[in-house]
Amino acid sequence: DIQMTQSPSSLSASVGDRVTITCRASQSISSYLNWYQQKEGKAPKLLIYAASSLQSGVPSRFSGSGSGTDFTLTISSLQLEDFATYYCQQTYSSPGTFGGGARVEIK
Amino acid sequence: QMQLVQSGAEVEKPGASVKVSCKASGYLFTSYHIHWVRQAPGQGLEWMGMINPSGGSTSFAQRFQGRVTMTRDTSTNTVYMELSSLRSEDTAVYYCARTKDGGYFPCYGMDVWGQGTTVTVSS
């Protein structure tokens, strides 16, 4: 199975900050990397697919980059509604493993 | 609009089975694979498996092999996930989700999610 490692596991930031979360795959997954946002008690929401493609309806302050084994999710200017947990997931091969999550909290 | 609506919360005893449903609407049911993902309390997301609603073929994570069954009913646009031999560690919220670009791996993530079904395993 492909292992997905996210860092940091949590961070504190202020509104307006630039936030970066990284995800590393244990082997190459080409660009089959997705990012989800999950708020407490809610289902995950797809933000970025294919490493860098913005899902319809997602604000442009979210962006993704990377290929192969190293990927990044960036929030250019953190908003109040962005405080949540973020997960990466590889969908290159079964099983579609998730990273451990990165919790973004208010500083 | 496209949506997946799941069945309600379940409470089961250890050793029992649970069957969760996921009804699709707003899109062509047979064109998009459905995944099942679970989340234990305070934990991360765990991919369990997927089903092709068109032919019924399935693929499961190794750790669930032999304990999970996924089926579909094309007459009602519903998929089902049944987990047997339940233990306390299976207490979780179970989600169904649609593959964005329809198919098996490799694919582009999951764009439509159900609201989640809480399964509690307790004696």
Image (tube, grey):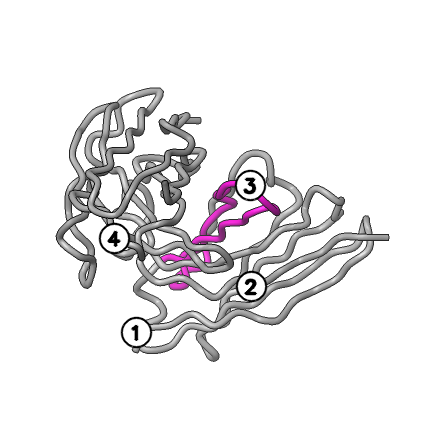
Q: Are marks 2 and 3 in contact (CB under 8 Å)?
A: no
Tag 2 subunit = B
Q: CA distance from mark 2 to mark 3?
A: 24 Å
Q: Position of residue B123 (x, y in %)?
A: 86, 53
**Labels 1 & 2 near each other (Cβ < 8 A):** no
Residue at image mark 3: B43
**Mark 3, secondary structure of its residue:** loop
| Magenta range | B33-57
Q: In the rendered structure, which disc, 1 or 2, sits on the residue that comes first in sequence?
A: 1
Residue A90 coordinates in the image, percent (x, y): 33, 36
Of tags 1 and 3, which is closer to the observer?
3
Three-letter code for the amino acid on which mark 2 is drawn: Tyr
Residue to which mark 4 is pinned: A79
Mark-to-mark CA distance, 4 and 1? 32 Å
Q: Secondary structure at mark 4?
A: loop
Q: Is residue B34 magenta?
A: yes
